[in-house]
């Protein structure tokens, strides 16, 4: 059984603050160690549940956060950015029996520790076919298109609630309880790692390739916090402006949907000015 872990950082043990996840800061150096331990706990649990191979795809910021030198030796790690499918790169290989979202978080505009969708700010909401869409929800559609079920989600308690909406069968492990966007009641690594490992082991009962799901056409709407950002997003072919702060696009497949969304997010990010947004 081959498993793909998509590892994001905002939902890791102990993480509650922008500096915790900002490459180069002292806090990030500390938190990447706890992030690596969360991933190792998942790898251990997945193997205990029957996984024979685990590929960890880094999915946060520059996608260079995990400490390879501390990674469980049974796993391999895809590190670095610029990948066709970004956070779920690897799922298109067609031999993935299960996907685990480790360190995930809620979407823009939702309650949740460090909640956002792709960009840390500027994007205030994303909807997929009319439903609020976190990164987990967007990526789950891509995984389904490649016949790989999402079996495990870890993050704060709100991210686990979010998972119930897009992968209701998945096992979850909450490593902290949301208090505000920048505050949480955190449990120490010793406890969260046991919870992650247990959930990961159970999750392997759900592993097994499915018939690829053809969802398309998929309509994505993105709302931003400044008018010119909607204009920047509408530069992408097929993306139309549907309001001062809103753009919409319809894609034939989840593959096209996530790539179009990534282009939109990149152009928005590029158009943000330092103080005026
Ligand atoms: Zn994220």
Image (cartoon, grey):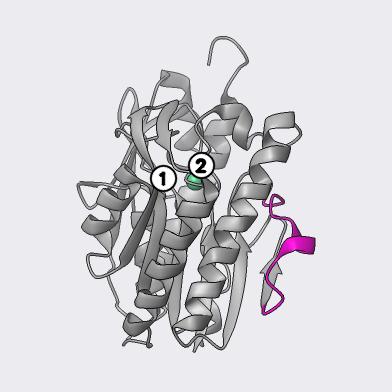
Picture layout, residue 249 above or below residue 232: below
- Residue farthest front in this picture: 190
Residue 245 location, x and y as percent? 34, 25
At x 51% / y 67%, what residue is drawn? 42
Q: Which secondary structure, mark 2?
A: loop
Q: Is residue 152 left or right of residue 165?
A: right
Callout 1 secondary element: loop
- Judge by depth and name the residue closer to the eye, 245 or 21: 21
Q: CA distance from mark 2 to mark 1?
A: 6 Å
Q: Does mark 2 have its CB less than 8 Å from ligand 1?
A: yes
In percent of width and height, residue 89 lies at 57, 67
Decide if ligand 1 comes within 8 Å of the CB at mark 1: yes
Q: At x 29% / y 56%, what residue is drawn?
A: 163
Segment tinted magenta in the rendering? 63-74
Residue name at image x 22 percent, y 65 percent: 168
Q: Is 14 located above or below residue 94 in the figure?
A: above
Residue 66 on the magenta span: yes
Corner quadrant of residue 38: bottom right
| Magenta highlight on residue 227 | no
Left or right, 145 with reference to 75: left
Label drawn at residue 10: 2
Question: Which quarter of the figure has residue 203?
Answer: bottom left
The residue pinned by badge 1 equals 105
The picture places residue 114, in percent across and down from the top left corner, at: 45, 33
Label ID, residue 142 = none
* Residue 53, visible in the rendered structure: yes
Q: Are marks 2 and 1 in contact (CB under 8 Å)?
A: yes
């Amino acid at each position: 059984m081959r498993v793909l872990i998509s590892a994001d950082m905002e939902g890791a043990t102990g993480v509650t603050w922008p500096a915790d996840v900002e490459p180069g800061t002292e806090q990030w150096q500390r938190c990447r160690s706890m992030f690596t331990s969360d991933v190792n706990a998942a790898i251990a649990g997945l193997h205990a549940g029957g996984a024979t191979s685990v590929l960890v795809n880094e999915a946060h910021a520059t996608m260079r956060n995990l400490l390879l030198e501390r990674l469980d030796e049974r796993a391999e790690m895809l590190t670095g950015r610029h990948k066709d499918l970004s956070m779920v790169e690897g799922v298109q290989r067609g031999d993935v029996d299960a996907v685990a979202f480790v360190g995930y978080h809620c979407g823009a505009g939702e309650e949740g520790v460090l909640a956002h969708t792709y960009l840390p700010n500027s994007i205030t909401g994303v909807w997929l076919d009319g439903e609020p869409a976190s990164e987990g929800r967007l990526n789950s559609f891509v995984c389904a298109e490649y016949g790989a079920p999402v079996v495990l989600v870890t993050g704060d308690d709100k991210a686990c609630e979010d998972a119930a909406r897009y992968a209701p069968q998945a096992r979850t492990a909450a490593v902290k309880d949301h208090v505000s966007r920048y505050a949480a009641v955190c449990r120490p690594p010793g406890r969260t790692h046991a919870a992650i490992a247990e959930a990961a082991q159970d999750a392997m009962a759900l592993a097994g390739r499915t018939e690829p799901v053809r969802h398309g056409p998929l309509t994505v709407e993105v709302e931003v916090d400044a008018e010119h950002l909607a204009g920047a997003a509408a530069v992408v072919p097929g993306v139309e402006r549907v309001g001062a702060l809103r753009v919409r696009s319809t894609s034939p497949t989840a593959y096209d949907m996530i790539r179009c969304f990534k282009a939109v997010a990149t152009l928005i990010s590029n158009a943000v000015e330092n103080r005026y947004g």
